[in-house]
Structures are given as structure tokens and as C-alpha cells.
Image (cartoon, rainbow, N blue to C red):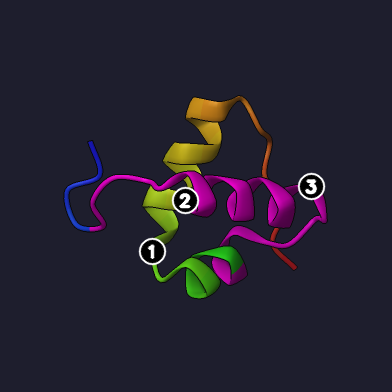
Amino acid sequence: MNSSGGSWSYESVQTLLTLAREGIPVSVISLKLKRSVTEVRAKLDDLGVTPAAEV
């Protein structure tokens, strides 16, 4: 599904969820996880999580 970043590991998903719940913007999460903003937004959408607003 994620063509450039590969599949999401359990650890990556847990980190993504933690950061998103802390209100970290998608642009920062993408840097921390070394994935594109598009990939991060898509995964959050798959998980039913609304990302924080960009500052």
C-alpha cells in the first residue's frame, strides 16, 4: 500500500499514534518516522485518527 515507504511496522504505528495523540503536526511526524506527509496522513486516515492542525 505504501509504495515508497514500505509496510508499517507495529512499532511505527505505535509511534505514529502516540505522536498524533500528543498533537504533533503531520509534517513533524513525517520527519520523525522518515515517511512522506502523504503516507502519514493516509495511515492516520486508515486508523481513524484526526491529525493535529499544522502550526
Q: Which of marks 2 and 1 is nearer the N terminus?
A: 1
**Contact flag, marks 2 and 1 (Cβ < 8 Å):** yes
Dot 3 crowding, Cα within 10 Å, few <14, some 14–19, many 20+: few
Residue 28 rendering spot, x and y as whole percentages: 60, 71
Q: Quadrant of residue 50?
A: top right
The stretch in magenta equals 5-28
Q: Position of residue 2 (x, y in %)?
A: 25, 44
Separation (CA) of disc 1 from disc 3: 18 Å
Q: In which quarter of the image is the C terminus?
A: bottom right
Can you tell which quarter of the image residue 37 is in? bottom left
Relative image position of residue 29 (x, y in whole percent): 58, 64
Residue linked to disc 3 = 21
Q: Residue 40 carries which label?
A: 2
Q: Is residue 31 above or below residue 36?
A: below
Query: Secondary structure under badge 3?
Result: helix
Q: Which residue is drawn at 38% across and 63% down?
A: 35
Mark 1 sits on what residue?
A: 35
Q: Which amino acid does label 3 sit on?
A: Arg
Separation of residues labelled 2 and 3 (CA atoms): 14 Å
Q: Do we see residue 53 in this rendering?
A: no
Whether the magenta-drawn stretch holds residue 7 is answered as yes
Judge whether 17 appears above or below 54 on screen: above
Q: Is 9 part of what is drawn in magenta? A: yes
Q: In which quarter of the image is the N terminus?
A: top left
Sequence-first disc among 1 and 3: 3
